[in-house]
Image (cartoon, rainbow, N blue to C red):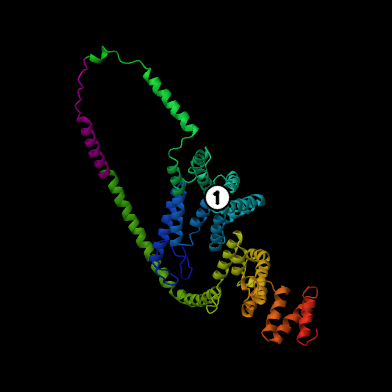
Amino acid sequence: MNCPRCNATVPFGKRNCSNCGEDMKDYWKVVSLSNIYYNKALGQAKIRDLTGAINSLKQSLQFNKLNTDARNLLGLIYFEVGEIVSALSEWVISKHYQDSGNDADYYIQEVQSNPNKLEMHSQTIRKYNAALYSAQHGDEDMAIIQLKKVVNTNPKFIRANQLLALLYMMSDKKDGRTRALKLLNNIIKVDVTNTTTLRYLQELSDVHTKADYFSAKNEEKKENSRKNLPHMDETDQYKTITPYKEERPSIMPFVNIIIGIIIGLAVMYCLIMPHIKSNEADNANKDFKKYSADQAASDSSSTALKNQNETLQARIEELEKELEEFQGDSASGTTILEIYDKLFKAANAFLEEDTEKAAKNLIDINIENLESSAAKKIYNTIASMSFPDVSEKLYVKGRDAYNGQNEYAAAVDYDKAKTFLEESLKYNPDNTDAMYFLGRTYQQKSKPKKAKEYYEKIINEYPDSPRVAEASSRLRELGISE
């Protein structure tokens, strides 16, 4: 276990860190509570109490977010119930906290090693979201069609099975409730304590499947066969029954046990005890000799320890400087942990197809601060697929604010136009449309020098842009030739 203050290794159960003196008592309690909930979740997962296991693991991570074993198990349970995005999120966070020797590497690789399977999971999530949207807007038939595909692809996707069962229960079809019961009986085997599944089963307690019908028939046949068994003859019913006599217990077994105990104690006292005392004396002599030798060695090494103290002090100062560099500039608030936290939020939003949220988390990250090549690859992938889209949306908002259209109809707002267009160029510095309207905005705000900068930038740096002719025309309006 490492000290939370200086990250030095501390033996289990030790009260204080030998490096910095930090009190470890409360820290041990927190770590122990986290492990208790993790062990509880393991037991729950083994008996298929997945809902209870998820709650226990969340409590474990509340006490110790660095418990990567608990986070990896939470990801496995999410994967088991069909929550692929949540599972990947937990494994990515676990990888962030423990870069090496982490089982999350294997889980992520298993998911990503098969692109076809990964795409299948992605399509499953999209179809489920589409079905949920259709159900919320009254198109139950379309929702049922989509959910059937989802359930056939991933039979353990609990939320999809529950929604399909609910739609069957609400439908007017004759066998709807029977189909719902069949679905719920399948997923109750995956998570035996899911409250939603149990509530739906309670609603369907009056529904019986064909298996129940045949089971009742078998019971009826057994009952009929019992009735056909031969009965006791009437003459046997009046025969005299011999009265039962209880045997009297014998005392001899107890006497033998007591005699055996006495003999055992006598043997132990005569043979074993002298040997134990002799061993204790020998151990005491050995301990005394070892203590004397250790004391002599301690006296001889005191001078060397004083010299080592100066070296260790210098090393501590170097480590403190490295820690300050790792934590970053406290004035700007940009620590490495915060940078990677934004990267993980962007990746999670991107997996959920929220490109705008992904781009907003990514825009404040300087790629030079990412030391890992994998992190830079993730950054470039998300940026290339989200920044142009966000830049175009911001450009459209800025253009509408400049022209007084759509959301800003009859209310021209050059200040908002300037804000939107500048934000658009942050996400895509090559957006010549945003440059052109930003120049026009500055021209309307009577700032010809700023307008000239953007017009000339379009003409000089983007000669193939369709905005070159318009920029030249605007320069002439300012009395400036290109």
Q: Nearer the viewer, residue 201 or 105?
A: 201
**Residue 103 in view in this figure:** no
Q: Magenta segment, principal secondary structure? A: helix
Q: Position of residue 76 (x, y in %)?
A: 53, 52
Q: Residue furthest bottom?
A: 479
In magenta segment, residue 265: yes
**Secondary structure under badge 1?**
loop
Q: Residue at x 23, y 14 (%)?
A: 238
Q: Is residue 160 left or right of residue 17?
A: right
Vertical placement of residue 36 versus 388, above or below = above
Q: Position of residue 19 (x, y in %)?
A: 45, 71
Q: Position of residue 364 (x, y in %)?
A: 60, 72
Q: Residue at x 27, y 13 (%)?
A: 234
Vertical placement of residue 62 versus 217, above or below = below
Q: Which residues are magenta?
A: 240-269
Residue at the spot of label 1: 82
**Residue 180 in view in this figure:** yes
Q: Nearer the viewer, residue 267 or 58?
A: 58
Looking at the rendered image, the quarter that the C terminus falls into is: bottom right
Q: Is residue 279 left or right of residue 329?
A: left
Vertical placement of residue 80 versus 357, above or below = above
In magenta segment, residue 301: no
Q: Nearer the viewer, residue 135 or 21?
A: 135
Q: Position of residue 261 (x, y in %)?
A: 24, 39
Q: Is residue 293 left or right of residue 448?
A: left
Q: Residue furthest top?
A: 235
Q: Quadrant of residue 462?
A: bottom right
Q: Amino acid at mark 1?
A: Gly
Q: Nearer the viewer, residue 222 or 45?
A: 222
Q: Residue at x 75, y 80 (%)?
A: 457
Q: Residue furthest front?
A: 410
